[in-house]
Image: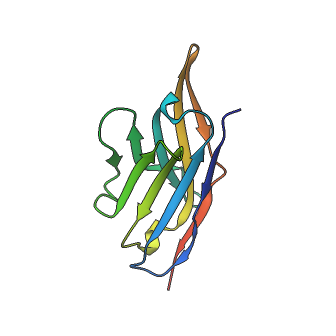
Amino acid sequence: QVQLVESGGGRVQPGGSLTLSCVVSGNIFDFGVLGWYRQVPGSQRELVASTYRFGPPKYSDAVQGRFTTSRDSAKNTVDLQMNSLKPEDTGVYYCNGERMMPTGIVNYWGQGTQVTVSS
């Protein structure tokens, strides 16, 4: 059973930093893409950062230069370092993994962790 479990959310003042971590059960190299999405009430989930089995990570324009994502194969985690946080970064952050199976790509989601940026 594949599971993704996020941690590290919380409340922070504008300009502050938080690090989210997602523990991936199983072999992290089985996932072609591991990404972070965020969602605010009334809106769709938006992709903020992705790591790939091969190649550099990618970021949305909204977080480019402020967020950094990376995989740690020794810990089987994918982290999201968030700096210079803004109130508009507030939302529930979800870890996502895409895994290629014989029947096609299967998506896995974590339960989400709340990030609130407010003074």
Residue found farthest to the bottom: 119
5 relative to 47 in the view: left or right:
right
Task: Look at the image and tell me whether residue 86 can be seen.
Answer: yes
Picture layout, residue 72 above or below residue 19:
above
Image spot of residue 44 (x, y percent): 54, 50
Image spot of residue 16 (x, y percent): 42, 77
Q: Nearer the viewer, residue 73 or 92?
A: 73
Picture layout, residue 66 above or below residue 14:
above
Image spot of residue 63 (x, y percent): 35, 60
At 50% from the left and 86% from the top, the residue drawn is: 119
Looking at the figure, which quarter contains the N terminus? top right
At 52% from the left and 36% from the top, the residue drawn is: 28
Identify the image's colour scheme: rainbow, by chain, secondary structure or one colour: rainbow
105 relative to 17 in the view: left or right:
right
At 66% from the left and 40% from the top, the residue drawn is: 3
- Residue 17: quadrant of the picture: bottom left
Image spot of residue 89 (x, y percent): 46, 66
Task: Look at the image and tell me whether residue 41 can be seen.
Answer: no
Q: Nearer the viewer, residue 73 or 113?
A: 73
6 relative to 36 in the view: left or right:
right
- Residue 51: quadrant of the picture: top left
